[in-house]
Structure formats: structure tokens, C-alpha cells
Amino acid sequence: MSNVQTEKIKQESRQILKDWLVSCTRRGKISRNTVAIGIVVFDHLRHSCPASRDEVISQGGEVSGARSGLGKILGEYGIPSSYLKEVTTRQGHQDGQRLLEQLEWGKNLAKIPAEEREHFLLECIEDLKKLASEWLKRQSLKIDVDRRQAPTTWVNVIIENSKGHSGGIVEQHLVGAKLARRFRNLSIPNYPAHAGDSQTERAGDFEISKMVYHVTSAPSRNVLQKCASNIRVGLYPVLLVPREQESKARVLAQDEGIDKELTIISIEDFVALNIIELATDESKDFFAVLKEIIEIYNKRLSEVESDLSLQIEVH
């Protein structure tokens, strides 16, 4: 095969990959499972080109290696397991099959000399790795606080700065860190923020004795019904929401008929009061206690969440 023909196949294949990524972009983002499945596809072509549909696609339509062997394949290319935490691959299988079909299962790539094809496929994987690296390197939330302001203002600044990409994660782990700092002799549970109560068979986000804490950035009827369920079985629910959501939470509590039994507190007040009490008890300044809570927050976040850009730095 001439160099001209080889370059033409490479160029066409690069364009297929580019167009495929565009077609997989949803709400302005390329999902992690799309990047992962793309790497799996090119990994298959490295080992068998052209690839056999029967060997690569299961009867259920799944791409071989994209479930149980996914972490191992990504690890071979230097992508850590944290990249795929809490990611489902259902849509990824469909995307992967489309990519293979558009590449005609590697039929044209098979015409390229083996060594040159191997180099080209690694280049394609490298392009996808860059997308994974960009996600992994996203910067943490950098918060500048005015030491002269009240701790409630500091907590509010953190919540406001996380809007748009927290989805309630910051709020939950901030409350978890506050409880862990306050009750050092207790083991405060640490779950991914989007693991539902029913999935984990728990009464709420945090349970201490008969107290059940529910943390949400946007109170809904669903969370109020969970609080009502707690009350019915003799537990004492506390609903923690951003200050701007307090009024909405109280209206929903009235609608559910539990406004007299349910304690509703803003996250700002809940964390700030703890900062003030601990600083007073331990003869520390407020900012020192805030930093301790943030350190605990970052540790807890890194243990169960994959989006480490939600780690916080306070200055």
C-alpha cells in the first residue's frame, strides 16, 4: 500500500473519531464512559484488526471488556480507577458499537502495515486519554474568605461558589465533615452524595442515635416524605438546606403536615454554629476551625467521590 493511501485511511479514521466524539457530546459534555469505551474500541483493534463482531459484541449488545475488564484496560494506559467512579456504561456500549461500525470494524485500518497501524491506534488512544486527563486535573474550588466576616458568611460563600456543578455533593460532605469534627468519638458514615437512601437502606444521610440528618441543595416533596417516614418510626429528622431554600422547605413541610415535628436548619447556620462553639471550647480562632472542617471534608470527599474538582481550598 502506498504512503498516500495509508495517510488517506488515517485521515478518514481521525475524522470518524472526531465526528463520533461530537455525536456523543450531550449537554455540552463528553461523558467519561464515552471516553472509556472509545479507548476499549481502539484497544480491541490493536489486538485484532479487523475485529470480529461476534467476538467484540455480546448477544446483549455489550462491548467486550467494557464492564468487568474496563478498569484493567484503562489502567494499562495510565488512567486511574477513580476516573470511572459512579459511572454507568449503558450508553457507552451503544456509543462503542457505533464507533466500530463507522470504522467498519477496522477493515480499512487492517490494510495499513502492522507497525504503522499500531502507532496510529496508540495515537487515537492518546487523544482520548487527553480528555480523561482534563477531567482528572480539574482544579479544586478556591475560596477567598474575609476573616472579618461571620462564619455563616464563609459557609454561604462556599455553597454559592459550588453552585452549578456540585449537585448537592458539597453540601452533603460539608455537613458530614462538620459532624465528624464535632463528634470525634463517633464513626460518621460516608456515602457518595448520589447514593439514594433506599439503595443503602438508611434512614437519611447521617444517623446519630435517634437523630437523622437529611442534606439537600434543593428540597423536594420526596425528601419531606422521607422525613415523615422517620417521624412515624420514632426518629427525629433534621432537614439541612442552603439558607435561600429554607422558606421552600418550610412550605413543603406544612404541605406534608410535619412542620411542627421537623427541624429545618440552614446549612450555613448548622456549620457556623459548630465553628463558633468549637473555637470557644478549644480557644481557637474561627478560621482555624473552618480549615480543620475543610480538611476533613476533602478527605471524606476523596474517599467516595470521583469529582475531585469539588475539593475546597480556603484562603
Image: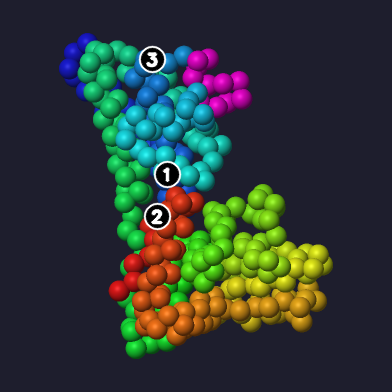
**Which residue is rendered at x = 29% and y = 37% of the image?**
127
Q: Going 26% across and 19% down the picture, which residue do you hit?
A: 117
Give left or right: position of 137 versus 258. left
Q: Tell me if I can see residue 282 in this picture.
A: yes
The residue that label 3 is drawn on is 48
Q: Position of residue 75 (x, y in %)?
A: 37, 33
Q: Amino acid at mark 2?
A: Leu
Neighbours of disc 3 within 10 Å: few (<14), some (14-19), many (20+): some
Q: Residue at x 37, y 72 (%)?
A: 291
Residue 220 picture quarter: bottom right
Q: Residue furthest left?
A: 3
First-in-chain label (3 vs 1): 3
Task: Report, in whole angstroms, how far the alpha carbon at label 2 lies from the one at label 1.
Answer: 9 Å
Question: What element does badge 1 sit on?
Answer: helix
Left or right: where 266 falls relative to 302: right
At label 2, counting other C-alpha atoms closer than 10 Å, the crowd grade (few under 14, some 14-19, many 20 or more) is many
Q: Is residue 54 above or below residue 211?
A: above
Mark nearer the N terminus (3 vs 2): 3
Disc on res. 82: 1
Tag in front: 3 or 2: 2
Three-letter amino acid code of the residue under disc 1 = Ser
* Residue holding disc 2: 308
Q: Is residue 150 above or below residue 135?
A: below
Amino acid at the residue labelled 3: Ser
Badge 3 element: loop
Distance of label 3 from label 1 (alpha carbons): 28 Å
- Is residue 57 found inside the magenta-colored segment of the image? yes
Q: Is residue 37 above or below residue 50?
A: below
At a point 26% along the width and 13% down the height, the residue shown is 114
Q: Which residues are magenta?
A: 53-63
